[in-house]
Image: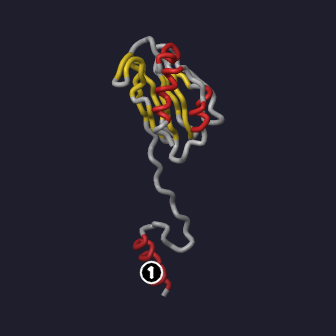
Amino acid sequence: MMSRVIAAALCLTAVLGGTGAIAGAPKTNPAKTPAKTIVVEMKDSGTEGAMVFVPAFIKANLGDTVRFVPTSLAHNAELIPAMLPTGVSPSKGAMGKQFDLMVTTPGIYGIKCAPHYSMGMVAVVQAGDGPSVNLAAARAAKLPPFAMKRMAGYLAKAR
């Protein structure tokens, strides 16, 4: 009799495949999307004109790295302090060097190339799936006129 009970239990386990389908068993979370590296080029010219980030609007998941790669020594990437999620500290890359932004906080990240900021060399990273809590603040940030014009177009894509 005892061997039949054990055999039945083993059979049930095999049928359920250890899926947690037994009542009261904890459900497993679906696998998260693995973090990726998104490459953004800092270029002297592109389809939008002179001094551009390509792409200039970047959608990233939390955990992703956005890698800014200069195509000449005259560019850098740095965060715009007025356009960051709460708790994110401004940081910047060195001239002519790659800059990696590790996305850990949801929201809008404004990016500029310091020497070409007044020429409109800006970009936006939208991080996370939900609505960006700092989108209104990012739209209200004061930027040089040409940077503001480009930035408004990028922020129109954000939510």
2 over 134 or under it: above or below: below
Q: Residue at x 46, y 33 (%)?
A: 154
Q: Position of residue 127 (x, y in %)?
A: 52, 39
Q: Residue at x 38, y 16 (%)?
A: 44
Q: Position of residue 104 (x, y in %)?
A: 56, 38
Q: Is residue 91 left or right of residue 42?
A: right
Of residue 152 and residue 130, the one placed in the foreground of this image is 152
Q: Residue at x 46, y 39 (%)?
A: 157
Can you identify the residue that label 1 sits on? 8
73 over 149 or under it: above or below: above
Mark 1 nearby-residue class (10 Å; few <14, some 14–19, many ≥20): few
Of residue 75 and residue 96, the one placed in the foreground of this image is 75
Q: Residue at x 43, y 11 (%)?
A: 73
Label 1 sits on a secondary structure element that is helix
Q: Amino acid at mark 1?
A: Ala
Of residue 53 and residue 66, the one placed in the foreground of this image is 53
Q: State the residue lying farthest toward the left.
A: 47
81 over 132 or under it: above or below: above
Q: Position of residue 92 (x, y in %)?
A: 56, 21
94 over 66 or under it: above or below: above
Q: Position of residue 76 (x, y in %)?
A: 49, 17
Q: State the residue lying farthest toward the bottom.
A: 1
